Image (cartoon, helix red, strand yellow):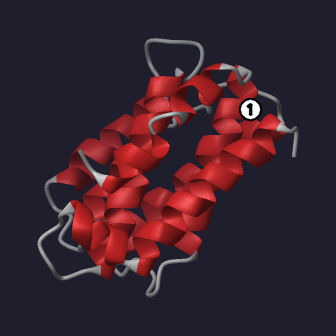
Amino acid sequence: MSYWTDEMNSQEARLEALSPQARLKVAFRALAWTVRTLESPIEDPDVAAFVTDGLARIESAVQRGLAIPDGVDAVAERYNELLDEAWEPGATNFLTGTLLCFSRRRPELPAGTIMDQLLDLYEGALIRASDEAITPEVERATPRAVEVIEFQKRLIDEVSRGA
């Protein structure tokens, strides 16, 4: 079991209690904060553009009170084009963390999908912050890993309180 799983396991029930619109807000704010606070920005221009476009679509949906952003087909197509070409550490995690905010099958994002997204964002940040093989001990000793988990918990608290 990973450090993230130990620390975040109780959060899924809290996400389930949120409205679909609030869950999308959590996903948007987690993605935006994680990529904004990277030690160095995403270098791959295609990955950076995908994440930036995804953030714009998600933010628009949040502002309009929607539970799912528009454009899932275009986003999924572009994701499939980029996934195999992504070379930068953590890039596939940030691609997937963006894609998970979109849904073809449901009118909203389930709490489990948000948990998957939060884990992807955590792993992407961790991979960029440590050159060591990832173990729970390395995770606990990596300041960025601790920072991301603390942010994610705080974010869920804030959105739960209506912030």
Picture coordinates of residue 25, whole percent (x, y): 70, 41
Which secondary structure, mark 1? helix
Picture coordinates of residue 5, whole percent (x, y): 36, 44
Q: Nearer the viewer, residue 144 or 55?
A: 144
* Vertical side of 125 occupied by 19: above or below: above
Task: Give the total number of marks visible in the rendering.
Answer: 1
The quadrant in which the N terminus is found is top left
Picture coordinates of residue 110, whole percent (x, y): 52, 20
* Vertical side of 138 occupied by 19: above or below: above
Q: Nearer the viewer, residue 158 or 113?
A: 158
Identify the image quadrant of residue 66: top right
* Residue depicted at x 46% and y 36%: 115
* Residue depicted at x 34% and y 55%: 3
Q: Nearer the viewer, residue 9 or 54?
A: 9
* Vertical side of 127 occupied by 60: above or below: above
Q: Which residue is mark 1?
A: 22
Query: Along the horizontal axis of the image, is 93 left or right of 73?
Result: left
Q: Is residue 71 among the parts visible in the rendering?
A: no
User: Tag 1: Cα neighbours inside 10 Å, few (<14), some, or many (≥20)?
Assistant: many
Picture coordinates of residue 37, whole percent (x, y): 56, 77
Q: Is residue 147 among the parts visible in the rendering?
A: yes
* Residue depicted at x 69% and y 51%: 155
Query: Along the horizontal axis of the image, is 120 left or right of 68?
Result: left
Query: What amino acid is labelled 1 in the image?
Result: Ala
